[in-house]
Image (cartoon, helix red, strand yellow):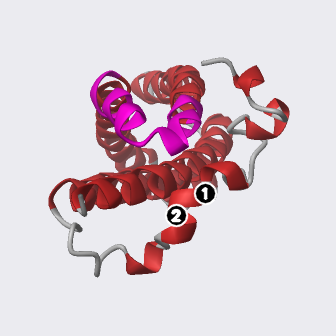
Amino acid sequence: MDLTDFPDDATLRLDMRHALPETLRTLVAAMPADGWAAHPGFGGLTQFWLERHAAFREILTVIVADAGASVAGEMPADAFVPRLHRSASTLLGELHGHHSIEDAHYFPQLRQLEPSVAHGFDLLEADHRDLDARLHGFADQVNGVLQAAQSGALLPLQVEPFAETAREFEGLLDRHLVDEEEIVIPALLKLSAG
């Protein structure tokens, strides 16, 4: 998909948008998030999807908090580094797998089953490409921090650029996850209702 398919493509870029455009909010407008859990079709895949997203948010919140504590001198390198390694490895692997299965399996099927928001799945796939590029930069910065720690020279000033990258990525990922939930969850619930 090319975002030029949309009338105002610049505002739809992940780093520029603040919400889904109204044309892609038709399902969530009819089925707001506060009613999802009470829907008879909620559970199984819908619940799993939301739990995966919650786990991504939680891991990234820990990474951001730990990086901030390291920069502030509140968390020594010998505590920060193993936590960063574990959390970042989990986040990178899980996000990559999640996005791959969405792009290859779920989004194509949902696009056909719910054509009213087909462009929404195009938008989400474009987000995945953007996030993938950012994940590479994130991983490079994690590796830089880990290498500095291995040499025994990790200083809070070396962690500061990574802390900023992690905060920015947290905001972008949350924007994507919220938008994805507002497209995918109502579509799944609508389809489960038959």
- Residue 170 spot, x, y in % from top left: 57, 49
Q: Is 88 in front, or is 133?
A: 133
Q: Is 123 in front, or is 150?
A: 123
Snapshot quadrant of residue 159 = top right
**Circle 2: residue type:** Val
Does the magenta stretch mainly form a helix, a strand or a loop? helix
Q: Residue at x 55, y 46 (%)?
A: 176
Residue 159 is one of the magenta-drawn residues: no
Quadrant that contains the N terminus:
top right
Q: CA distance from mark 1 to mark 2?
A: 5 Å
Snapshot quadrant of residue 166 = top right
Q: Residue at x 75, y 46 (%)?
A: 17
Q: Is 174 in front, or is 136?
A: 174
Q: Is 180 in front, or is 189?
A: 189
- Residue 94 spot, x, y in % from top left: 29, 36
Q: What number of labels is visible?
A: 2
**Circle 1: residue type:** Arg
Residue at the far left in the pictured view: 44
Q: Are marks 1 and 2 in contact (CB under 8 Å)?
A: yes
- Residue 194 spot, x, y in % from top left: 23, 58
Residue at the far front in the pictured view: 194
Q: Residue at x 55, y 51 (%)?
A: 179
Judged from the image, the secondary structure of the residue bearing numbered disc 1 is loop
Does residue 66 appear in the picture of this structure?
no
Q: In the picture provided, is 56 more to the left or to the right than 182?
A: left
Write down the region rendered in magenta. 104-123
Return the residue at label 1.
Answer: 25
Q: Residue at x 43, y 56 (%)?
A: 57
Q: In the picture provided, is 34 more to the left or to the right than 165?
A: left
Q: Is residue 40 above or below residue 113?
A: below
- Residue 58 spot, x, y in % from top left: 39, 59
Return the residue at label 2.
Answer: 28
